[in-house]
Image (cartoon, grey):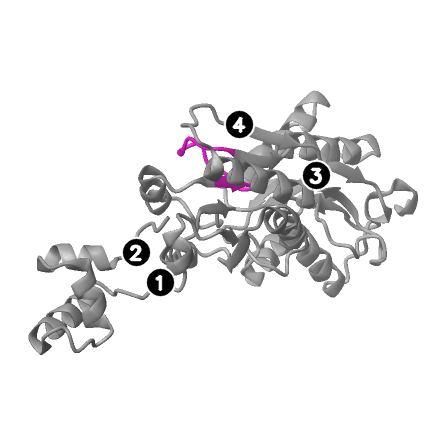
């Protein structure tokens, strides 16, 4: 199905001629007058008409292509999600078209528009940290494009979604830091309007409350661009480190923020965990061999991609209207390593 793209039929309707005449005019056929050709070409240019590279497959009623919108491919979590997506898509005869937002709303909008012009059958999307306006997705959803959200999701569209158990993962991470003796625990997270930010902040606060530790807002720091802007993380860490009431541990809430925090603390000469302990959400394969080895909350990226794709293909191939939608919550896993181990803390 072709969502959002101008078609030959649209041009034909506007000019009051047949679709076959438009097609022949675009092909510069001798059967069409020069006057009609000129009108067709001007109309096509006005509406940014692009020949559809999947025209033959569309004649069969579908393109067998899925559009994917993620933050960045170099993020280990999203790489694992893509592997999960491809494992299902290819086995079902679908191709995937992968795009990156780099946490930009404008790029997300551009990517979604590009994918719909390519006549995708469905869309898998993890929202950028800058995205607040969902009109571009609501429009496509209302037109009937199957959409499934994963990781960073929204409740504004009625459709399937797949997430990690972010609240529980954050709760377990914060509780571990408390259990080994830390009381001043900072939380460095992403933009406050993103779904995973709210869920992980909730888990962090819950662990503090249950252990009678007051929630101190000066220890909660937001990176509005999800860590894409290095200066954001540098400024946040500088505020924490230079504080007269310096935190004893930092709990970071995303892949990019976690690994960048480790790098910056090393650069500043902050010893981990002797000076400040560190634990964060990350799926990096290097966590165990870093210095120190990095305590981490691991998300089931492959399973998330697999499940989201199964749900999307289910929407695409169903023969009946879908009225009930699921939010699937997958468990996280906490790995305790040296960066948060009390045995290494200087006395």
Whether pointer 4 and pointer 2 mark residues with C-beta atoms closer than 8 Å, the reply is: no
Select label 1 or label 2 by which is in front: 1
The answer to which of marks 1 and 2 sits earlier in the sequence is: 2
Select label 1 or label 3 by which is in front: 1
Whether pointer 4 and pointer 3 mark residues with C-beta atoms closer than 8 Å, the reply is: no
Select label 4 or label 2 by which is in front: 2
Position of residue 70 measured from the top left corner of the image (x, y, whole percent) = 53, 53
Give the quadrant of the C terminus. Answer: top right
Q: Name the residue under label 4.
A: 326
Q: Distance between the residues labelled 4 and 3?
A: 34 Å
Residue 158 belongs to the span the image colors magenta: yes
Main secondary-structure element of the magenta-colored stretch: loop
Q: How crowded is mark 1: few (under 14 residues within 10 Å), some or many (20 or more)?
A: some
The answer to which of marks 1 and 3 sits earlier in the sequence is: 1
Whether pointer 1 and pointer 4 mark residues with C-beta atoms closer than 8 Å, the reply is: no
* SS state under label 1: loop
Left or right: residue 15 compared with residue 319: left
**Residue at left offset 84%, top offset 34%:** 180
Residue 214 falls in image quadrant: top right
**Residue at left offset 50%, top offset 55%:** 103
Q: Distance between the residues labelled 2 and 3?
A: 50 Å
The answer to which of marks 4 and 3 sits earlier in the sequence is: 3
Q: Distance between the residues labelled 1 and 3?
A: 54 Å
Left or right: residue 328 compared with residue 294: left
Say which mark, if any, is on residue 5: 2
Q: Residues within 10 Å of mark 4 (few under 14, many from 20)?
A: few
Whether pointer 1 and pointer 3 mark residues with C-beta atoms closer than 8 Å, the reply is: no
The answer to which of marks 1 and 4 sits earlier in the sequence is: 1
Depth check: give the residue in front, 17 or 286.
17
Say which mark, if any, is on residue 185: 3
Position of residue 336 measured from the top left corner of the image (x, y, whole percent) = 83, 41
Q: Name the residue under label 1.
A: 52
């Amino acid at each position: 199905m072709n969502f959002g793209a101008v078609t030959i039929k649209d041009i034909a309707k506007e000019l009051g001629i047949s679709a076959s005449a438009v097609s022949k005019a675009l092909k510069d056929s001798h059967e069409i007058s020069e006057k009609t050709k000129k009108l067709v070409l001007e109309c096509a240019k006005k509406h940014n008409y692009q020949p559809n590279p999947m025209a033959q497959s569309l004649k069969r009623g579908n393109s067998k292509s899925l559009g994917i919108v993620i933050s960045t491919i170099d993020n280990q979590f999203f790489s694992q999600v893509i592997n999960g997506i491809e494992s299902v898509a290819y086995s079902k005869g679908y191709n995937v078209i992968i795009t990156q937002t780099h946490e930009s709303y404008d790029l997300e909008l551009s990517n979604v528009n590009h994918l719909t012009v390519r006549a995708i059958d469905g869309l898998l999307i993890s929202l950028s940290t800058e995205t607040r306006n969902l009109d571009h997705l609501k429009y496509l959803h209302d037109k009937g494009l199957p959409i499934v959200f994963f990781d960073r999701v929204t409740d504004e569209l009625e459709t399937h979604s797949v997430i990690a158990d972010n609240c529980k993962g954050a709760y377990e991470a914060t509780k571990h830091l408390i259990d080994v003796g830390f009381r001043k625990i900072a939380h460095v997270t992403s933009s406050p309007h993103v779904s995973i930010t709210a869920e992980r902040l909730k888990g962090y606060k819950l662990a503090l409350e249950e252990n009678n530790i007051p929630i101190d807002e000066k220890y909660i720091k937001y990176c509005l661009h999800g860590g894409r802007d290095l200066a954001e993380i540098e400024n946040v860490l500088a505020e924490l480190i230079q504080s007269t009431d310096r935190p004893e541990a930092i709990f970071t809430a995303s892949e990019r923020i976690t690994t960048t925090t480790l790098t910056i603390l090393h650069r500043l000469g902050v010893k981990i965990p002797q000076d400040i302990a560190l634990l964060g959400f990350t799926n990096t394969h290097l966590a165990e061999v870093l210095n120190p080895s990095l305590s981490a909350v691991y998300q089931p990226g492959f399973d998330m991609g697999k499940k989201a794709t199964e749900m999307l293909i289910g929407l695409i191939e169903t023969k009946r209207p879908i009225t009930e939608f699921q939010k699937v919550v997958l468990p996280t896993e906490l790995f305790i390593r040296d960066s948060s181990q009390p045995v290494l803390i200087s006395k």
